[in-house]
Image (spheres, rainbow, N blue to C red):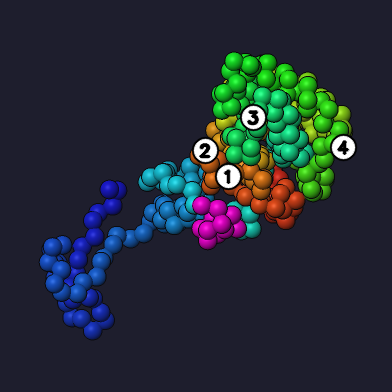
Amino acid sequence: SHYPPPSFHYPPPSSSSSSSSPLVVPPRSRSVPFIISRPAQTPKRAQLLEARRHTCTFIEHRGEDKRFQDIGFKPDRQTSPPQPGTWQSIRMADAKSAEDGVTVQAIIFDLDGTLIDYEEASRRAMCDVVGKHGKTVDWKLHSTLLGRKMHDVGQRVVDALDLKSIYTADSFVKVYYERMGELYSGIKPMDGVLDVLNAFKDKGLPMAIATSSYTESYNKKMKFHKDIEAFVELHVCGDDPKVKKGKPAPDIFLAAKARLEKIVGKLEPSKIIVFEDSPFGLEGAYAAGMMGVALPDKRIDHSIAGTDFSKATWVCKDGIKEFLKEIPKLKVEKPGPSV
């Protein structure tokens, strides 16, 4: 709308043509060959066209792309992200990591299923509790519980297994944690976790943990993982007063960001990477404007409704250790002035 419409000319101009003013053919008269004569390409127009040409490369970037702000570029429409594993997904991931490099200021980790192998022990504890009443928690049900606040977990189990006459959500969680207390010592770190944490430390990136676990549970399980806790600046738990809503709400990630800022300085959400085994956790990260690394557990049924990693910036099907090859490509940016 900012440029004059093209005119249609016949015959095509050539050096041998003696006519200095070609015949103008009305747009509907297209029975003869024609070429399109466009207005001169200004620097501003060239920038806009270049921006549009590269839109697909940055489609998965969360937050605003500042390179396009000064030329007033906005995508014409919202485009759904490609499915993981497709050539589009691979091309965009390669473009972000290899060609441009993703700019990063901080890292936030989920805990259970991301840093420590919690899910098998968790399901076992639930099965022990509900087994007394002739029920079981299969992996399909367990898949719907990942990343949620413990009150929500209790409510879902009680509702799904029709145990409302025996437990409330909170009383189920209480009994569950009593059983989990006996299993914490056997929970092991996820394969490759310490290597990844060391690589981020060498990059100088500040790290935090954002877990839906209650504080009491976090403290008990982390007594056996002091080596992991030594790498992070802080942790935020699901019962923190700042976490009004659990994942997939962004509360817990925004709380972690705010507390990191008090230590390291101002952070941009779009330059924070969140590691999550839960699609609900990834939704929370995206709602906070952050990037996400999906760590799908092969034991979990990810085909059920609502369990979808198609929006992930990266998908590491072989666990967190797979991300080691991406870390050298990241561009580290120091946080801004302290807030």
- Looking at the image, residue 95 sits to the left or right of residue 78; the answer is right
Q: Mark 3 points at which residue?
A: 135
The reply to whether residue 317 is visible in this rendering is: yes
CB of mark 2 within 8 Å of CB of mark 3? Answer: no
- What is the secondary structure assignment of the residue under circle 4? helix
The residue located at (15%, 74%) in the rendering is 32
Q: Which mark is residue 302?
A: 1
| Image location (x, y in percent) of residue 229 | 83, 33
Q: Mark 2 points at which residue?
A: 306
Quadrant showing the C terminus: top right
Q: Nearer the viewer, mark 3 or mark 1?
A: 3
Q: 307 or 46: which is nearer to us?
A: 307
Disc 1 or disc 4, which is closer to the eye?
Answer: 1
The correct choice, above or below, for 317 with respect to 127 in the image is below
Q: Residue at x 62, y 49 (%)?
A: 314
Label 2 or label 3, whichever comes before in sequence order:
3
Image quarter for residue 120? top right
Residue occupied by mark 4: 227
Badge 1 vs badge 2, beta-carbon distance below 8 Å = no
Q: Distance between the residues labelled 1 and 2?
A: 8 Å
Distance between mark 2 and mark 3 Cα atoms = 24 Å
Q: How crowded is mark 3: few (under 14 residues within 10 Å), some or many (20 or more)?
A: some
The amino acid type of the residue labelled 1 equals His
Amino acid type assigned to the residue bearing label 3 in the image: Lys
Q: What stretch is highlighted in magenta?
A: 83-94
